[in-house]
């Protein structure tokens, strides 16, 4: 569409005036009256302001002396350029504790999680798409459930089961029931972090590999058979090369997500001084070591940029994010034979461990008056519905009677609804600009800038916005402590997903449908309302649901930004757990899980929303 | 009233030069068909007329009013041009009923409700789809969707109706039915129609004028008869006509007002060059001078094949004879060349039979081989 040039009020060449002048006027008028250009311009300015400027600012900050440095370091002039902070971070006295050890931990966790997730996800993907395993449809629904729930709720469950006396307090489930106190390596730190994260992130690998597997038409393999290749040759020469990009993508994407994750290592590591970059970043912010926190953020961002770059370089630009569209042709399923039942049992067991067990453990614990004591006379409803009792939890009343929790529920619903509605709508508008401007520099620029938040791990994003918006800025009042900042950061952070959904949605609406309305004289606003929006409806719903669920379970992004007044349910869980009130956090997380599951099931059953597009959060 | 005047229009997509110095006039009330192979710029021309694309240079006038001027980046919005467009894909809005699809433009113009109802019902009735008013496009067949798209484009009574390959998605039977329907519609509405197709039969049967495009250049704008009988370019001659026109290499020379042509068919003296080439002046074509490397073009129906020798006939051998009911296609070998003849009725020739072949000399066209331009036209 060339609305670029069809101005609202252009004028033919005037007689008295120079043609050059008329041309300039016509070009300018069309530039600024054309809605496409106006939206592009506004989008670019806003995106740059919300994403690029903050990034630039934190980079700048790390290269300048800070006011408090003048008291600590001789010769420091606040505001002047320095590489001191970077040098101190990378080679100073504290470098080992603040950077290198957490970095080593982050890298090893991310690598192991990626490998384990790939193994789990790939295996399940193969079982579900290529074998005669019973109830495959049901499993394909179920395998995504762990991913829909917060990753850190598995960490909470782990602690509840494996806790030993190291951190004090009451014993864990194993210690209490079997009198066996698990060793530290099993209870805290590396091993449980890797295991719980893998049970979460295997969904990436599952989604990518299963869609690659099901997109390989049976005919491709049958052609191989006709050509006389053996099953193994077919697997090696046809199937594997076709799935390889998905496998690499899954590995790299899992890595880039796992490296920045905060909740799980926080629950499993902080108490035993096992730090990753993300938890160290959190601690730095809490200790007001802002510059250190920024440098850690940048380290995380650089790693994420590098991995995504690697992905692009190895797999080619688009394939890594869009899955190869499947035709679902008839396939010869591999018969599992006598292994059918054992494998089914193993898969069911895995689902129980990944989904039911953590929920059950936390639910059970929420009914214990004193945690760690699994006796009938210790059962209570206090943490759910009890009135304040000075003898329990310093007089905190059960969550259903607790004004703070109700407020958190209100905040959460407001945040989640606002963020998902706004993000989806923004995604639609940007998707429109991108899809209609694919051949223009503006469209590509918007596409790329809106992808940037993907490269900024949530916790680092929170740290950046914490400093950016704690004071008033151009057009924006000080947002810290308001719901506004939580909505803003959520919208921006989910932009890569909402914009991708919006773009693919818009791609399906042919430009001719709009041009037909243009010929009839419909204005841009009218076309958007009457043609584009109604046709985008279905995609709107699935984008909305995905962001709704991501925002509902979000902890990493907002943990640095929320205040008691703007606490969400997820944040309430975190502060209860931090304060040792396990039953409260168990009860709250159960509520979160219940809400997510209800939305997930409703969306899948009623809205027919395809969750497999949800590589978010 | 709605004469369209395109002059010196150039259109680029990025660096791709799509329309090259396009000059085309569509007279008021014409049914002008843009014809040419896929990718030659027909749709682009239509979109420039509609205002969906802006030319880089050149001007466009509709009904005397300036609609686009590339030099000053002036481009009148589509809705202000009094044109309407039927897209190749129909572009029906899938979320609106047939009625709403057709009524949309009138609603935008804030026409009163009773008037909208009357006009929409009228347009639907005219295209025989009144009973589908409350259906959605997806509940209609391809042919019915096509009618809705046309109804939508005529309901606001545009001065100019633009149609982009409207019949290309229909099956053969429907296509023939819609051809006569569209022709009738044009006569009833008395609007100017610009019609895009790559189907020559469609162009020849429906149009009052045809503009033939090759690679972004207008090669000939003429009546269907002129296009068929006097293609001014060898590519046009090749593109139009089924079975294809015969090309025979020849040498030619001028002898006063006569052109002497030597080929495998012997020597022919084609008389009165001035009158044969007279009509080219009126369509703005300058005939090429003829020379040693020329090409003789003759349509199969102007080739006669007989059992008996006759004056001017050359001996040939029947390569194949393909009777097809009302006509027979004959391939004949003459001194190493193969020539296709179309004779009416059932001509019974056996394979390899000897026969005599002659050409209807006043229907021959001669082209300059190097430029492909016409050197000698046929008599109408
Ligand atoms: N939006 C576009 N961007 C770039 N090139 C285009 C675009 N539309 C058409 N073209 C190119 O312009 C040429 C003419 O296209 P078009 O007018 O659609 O041809 P036709 O309708 O005769 O088949 C083709 O070579 C086509 O590839
Ligand atoms: Mg076309």
Image (tube, helix red, strand yellow):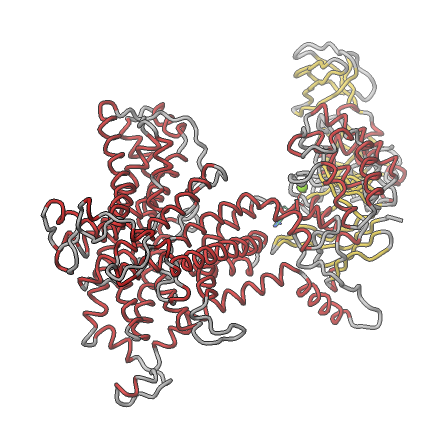
Residue A279 vertical position relative to residue B200 in the rendered view, above or below: below
Ligand 2 positioned in quadrant: top right
Q: Is residue A227 visible?
A: yes
Q: Position of residue B48 (x, y in %)?
A: 73, 51
Looking at the picture, tell me which residue is in the foreground, A16 or A376: A376
Q: Position of residue B156 (x, y in %)?
A: 81, 44
Dividing the picture into quarters, in which one does residue B146 lie?
Answer: top right
Q: Position of residue B192 (x, y in %)?
A: 84, 43
Among all residues in the image, which is located at the extreme bottom?
A75
Looking at the picture, tell me which residue is in the foreground, B26 or A511: A511
Q: Is residue B374 visible?
A: no
In the image, taking residue B129 as reference, residue A379 lies left or right, namely left
Instruction: Please give the name of the residue rendered at 33% of the width and 30% of the height, measured from the top-left corner.
Output: A130
Looking at the picture, tell me which residue is in the foreground, A541 or A443: A541
Instruction: Please give the name of the residue rendered at 9% of the width and 47% of the height, measured from the top-left corner.
Output: A179
Looking at the picture, tell me which residue is in the foreground, B276 or B223: B223
- Figure disc tally: 0
Dividing the picture into quarters, in which one does residue B306 lie?
Answer: top right
Q: Position of residue B345 (x, y in %)?
A: 78, 13
């Amino acid at each position: 569409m060339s609305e670029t040039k069809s101005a609202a009020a252009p004028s033919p060449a005037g007689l008295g005036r120079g043609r050059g002048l008329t041309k300039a006027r016509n070009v300018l008028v069309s530039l600024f009256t054309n809605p496409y250009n106006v939206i592009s311009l506004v989008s670019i300015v806003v995106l740059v302001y919300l994403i690029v400027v903050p990034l630039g600012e934190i980079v700048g900050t790390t290269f300048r002396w800070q006011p408090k440095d003048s008291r600590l370091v001789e010769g420091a002039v606040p505001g002047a350029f320095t590489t001191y902070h970077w040098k101190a971070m990378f080679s100073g006295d504290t470098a080992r504790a603040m950077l290198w050890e957490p970095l080593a931990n982050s890298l090893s966790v991310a690598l192991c999680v990626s490998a384990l997730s790939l193994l789990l996800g790939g295996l399940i993907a193969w079982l579900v798409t290529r074998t005669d395993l019973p109830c495959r449809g049901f499993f394909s629904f179920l395998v995504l459930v762990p991913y829909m729930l917060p990753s850190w709720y598995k960490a909470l469950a782990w602690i509840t089961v494996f806790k030993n006396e190291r951190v004090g307090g009451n014993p864990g489930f194993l210690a209490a029931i079997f009198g066996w106190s698990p060793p530290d390596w099993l209870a805290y730190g590396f091993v449980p972090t890797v295991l719980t994260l893998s049970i979460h992130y295997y969904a990436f690998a599952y989604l990518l590999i299963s869609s690659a597997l099901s997109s390989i038409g049976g005919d491709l393999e049958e052609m191989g058979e006709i050509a006389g290749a053996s099953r193994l040759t077919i697997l090696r020469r046809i199937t594997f090369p076709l799935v390889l990009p998905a496998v690499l993508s899954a590995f790299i994407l899992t890595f880039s997500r796992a490296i920045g994750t905060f909740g799980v290592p926080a629950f499993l590591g902080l108490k035993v001084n096992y730090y990753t970059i993300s938890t160290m970043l959190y601690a730095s912010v809490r200790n007001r070591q802002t510059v250190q926190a920024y440098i850690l953020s940048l380290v995380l961002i650089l790693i994420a940029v590098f991995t995504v770059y690697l992905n692009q370089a190895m797999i080619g630009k688009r394939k890594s994010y869009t899955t190869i569209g499947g035709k679902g042709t008839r396939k010869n399923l591999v018969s599992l034979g006598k292994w059918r039942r054992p494998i089914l049992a193993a898969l069911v067991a895995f689902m129980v461990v990944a989904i039911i067990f953590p929920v059950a453990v936390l639910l059970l614990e929420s009914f214990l008056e004193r945690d760690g004591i699994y006796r009938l006379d210790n059962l209570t409803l206090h943490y759910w519905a009890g009135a304040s009792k000075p003898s329990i939890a310093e007089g905190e009343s059960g969550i259903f009677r607790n004004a703070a929790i109700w407020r958190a529920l209100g905040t959460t619903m407001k945040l989640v609804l606002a963020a998902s509605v706004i993000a989806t709508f923004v995604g639609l508008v940007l998707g429109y600009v991108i899809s209609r401007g694919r051949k223009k520099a503006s469209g590509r620029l918007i596409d790329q800038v809106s992808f940037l938040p993907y490269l900024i791990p949530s916790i680092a994003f929170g740290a950046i916005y914490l400093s950016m918006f704690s004071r008033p800025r151009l057009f924006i009042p000080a947002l810290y402590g308001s719901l506004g900042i939580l909505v803003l950061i959520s919208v921006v952070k989910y932009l890569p997903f909402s914009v991708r959904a919006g773009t693919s949605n818009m791609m399906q609406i042919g430009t001719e449908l709009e041009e037909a309305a243009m010929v009839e004289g419909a204005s841009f606003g009218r076309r958007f309302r009457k043609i584009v929006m109604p046709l985008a409806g279905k995609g709107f719903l699935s984008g909305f649901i995905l962001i709704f669920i991501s925002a509902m379970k979000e902890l990493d992004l907002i943990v640095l930004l929320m205040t008691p007044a703007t606490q969400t349910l997820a944040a309430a869980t975190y502060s209860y757990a931090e304060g040792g009130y396990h039953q409260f956090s168990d009860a709250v997380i159960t509520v979160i899980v219940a809400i997510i599951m209800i939305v997930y099931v409703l969306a899948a059953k009623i809205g027919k929303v395809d969750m497999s597009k949800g590589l978010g959060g | 009233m709605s004469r369209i005047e395109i002059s010196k229009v150039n259109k680029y997509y990025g660096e791709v030069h799509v329309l090259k110095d396009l000059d085309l006039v569509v007279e008021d009330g014409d049914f002008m068909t843009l014809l040419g192979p896929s990718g030659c710029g027909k749709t682009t021309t239509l979109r420039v007329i509609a205002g969906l694309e802006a030319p880089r240079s050149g001007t466009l006038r509709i009904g005397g009013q300036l609609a686009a001027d590339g030099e000053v980046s002036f481009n009148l919005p589509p809705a202000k041009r009094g044109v309407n467009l039927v897209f190749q894909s129909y572009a029906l809005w899938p979320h609106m009923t047939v009625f709403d699809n057709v009524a949309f433009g009138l609603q935008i113009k804030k026409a009163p409700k009773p008037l909208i109802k009357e006009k929409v019902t009228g347009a639907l009735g005219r295209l025989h789809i009144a009973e589908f008013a409350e259906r959605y496009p997806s509940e209609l067949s391809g042919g019915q969707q096509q009618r809705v798209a046309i109804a939508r484009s005529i309901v606001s009574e545009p001065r100019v109706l633009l149609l982009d390959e409207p019949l290309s998605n229909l099956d053969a039977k429907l296509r023939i039915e819609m051809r006569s329907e569209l022709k009738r519609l044009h006569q009833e509405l008395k609007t100017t129609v610009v019609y895009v197709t790559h189907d020559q039969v469609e162009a020849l049967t429906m149009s009052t004028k045809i503009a033939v495009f090759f690679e972004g250049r207008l090669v000939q704008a003429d009546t269907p008869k002129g296009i068929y009988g006097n293609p001014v370019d060898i590519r046009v001659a090749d593109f139009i006509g089924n079975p294809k026109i015969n090309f025979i290499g020849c040498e030619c020379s001028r002898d006063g007002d006569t052109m002497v042509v030597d080929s495998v068919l012997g020597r022919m003296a084609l008389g009165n060059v001035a009158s044969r080439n007279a009509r080219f002046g009126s369509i703005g074509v300058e005939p090429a001078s003829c020379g040693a490397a020329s090409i003789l073009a003759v349509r199969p129906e102007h080739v006669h094949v007989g059992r008996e020798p006759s004056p001017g006939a050359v001996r040939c051998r029947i390569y194949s004879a393909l009777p097809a009911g009302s006509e027979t296609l004959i391939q004949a070998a003459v001194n190493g060349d193969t020539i296709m003849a179309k004779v009416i009725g059932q001509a019974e020739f056996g394979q390899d039979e000897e026969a005599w072949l002659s050409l209807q000399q006043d229907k021959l066209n001669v082209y300059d081989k190097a430029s492909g331009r016409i050197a000698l036209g046929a008599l109408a």
